[in-house]
Amino acid sequence: MNGLTIALTFCDRPVMPEWAVAFACQSYPSGISREVIVAKNLGLSQDWLEKVVTSARKKNSKYIWLLHDDVEPPFFATRKLIYDLEQNDQVMVAAGIYCLKGLPTEPFVYRGDGEGAFWHWKVGDVFECDAIGDGCMMIKTEIFDKIEKPWFHFEKSRMQGNDTIGDVGEDFFFCRKVRAAGFKILADGEVVCPHWDVENKCAYGLPRDSYPLAKEQELVESE
């Protein structure tokens, strides 16, 4: 029996040294057993993610940690996200927050369908959300006994009346199923992850003047 299945998704690109060090230095909960499974050049396909779930269930893993090869987790990420899951039986997903690659950037965390990125939180906050990116996502494996397949699916943009509904990624699709089943999803503002643009060797994060960092900036200026 394994406590944690770690699913690493590698695309056809190099890995930044910062990411490798962050993963190597990860601090896991004491006494937890682990298995690592790797997708190489498969991307975030539905087949790969379903294989992750199948492997975790066969191993009787209590948790699944999805980690992308360009999302750098803080060293305490696994311990903190598992802590978040264990505080409430209704919480099935807890995830770190990372930002869009591009300027102006925005966090991959959402409240309300069609309302865009959710900004009204502070670094350090843990809050309920409707959807969040799966680049650093911890999941209770039991949720897959409570929702039907497909668990993950990518939907292209479509028209609904006079409105265009944007692409729905595999993470959004999964989050909607979790919420529809009556369970909660948490975003952890303490687990803030740099999102690496490997080609340009730079990482995207929260802008210094953004709302989530405002309190931290005020503290720095007051010193």
Image: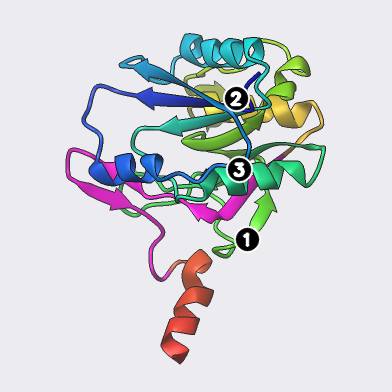
Residue at (44, 45) in percent of width and height: 73
What amino acid type is highlighted by mark number 2?
Answer: Phe
Please state which of the two labelled residues, at mark 3 or mark 1, is closer to the viewer: 3
Relative to 5, does residue 192 appear above or below in the rendering?
A: below
Q: Quadrant of the C terminus?
A: bottom left
Q: Which residues are magenta?
A: 185-209
> Can you give x and y, in whole percent of width and height, for residue 19 in the image?
32, 42
Name which quarter of the figure residue 176 lies in: top right
- Rendering coords of residue 42 (x, y %): 36, 14
Which of pointers 3 and 2 lies earlier in the amino acid sequence?
3
Q: Earlier in the sequence, mark 2 or mark 1?
A: 1
**Res 129 seen here:** no
Q: Which residue is rendered at x = 49% and y = 75% of the image? A: 216
For label 2, the SS is: helix
Asked where in the image residue 173 lies, by quadrant, the reply is: top right
Color scheme of the displayed model: rainbow
Residue 29 badge: 3
- Give the number of the mark in front: 3 or 2: 3
> Is tag 3's residue or tag 1's residue first in the polypeptide sequence?
3
Point out the frontmost of discs 2 and 1. Answer: 1
Residue picked out by circle 1: 125
Which residue corresponds to the image point at 45% horizontal and 50% vertical from the top-left?
Answer: 75
Residue occupying image coordinates x 29% and y 50%: 203
Q: Amino acid at mark 3?
A: Pro
Measured in 3D between alpha carbons, the distance from the residue under mark 2 to the one under mark 1, in whole angstroms, is: 24 Å
Residue 32 part of the magenta segment: no
Label 2: how many Cα within 10 Å (few below 14, some 14–19, many 20+): some
Q: Position of residue 112 (x, y in %)?
A: 66, 43
Mark 3 and mark 1: span between their CA atoms? Answer: 21 Å
Which residue position holds label 2?
173
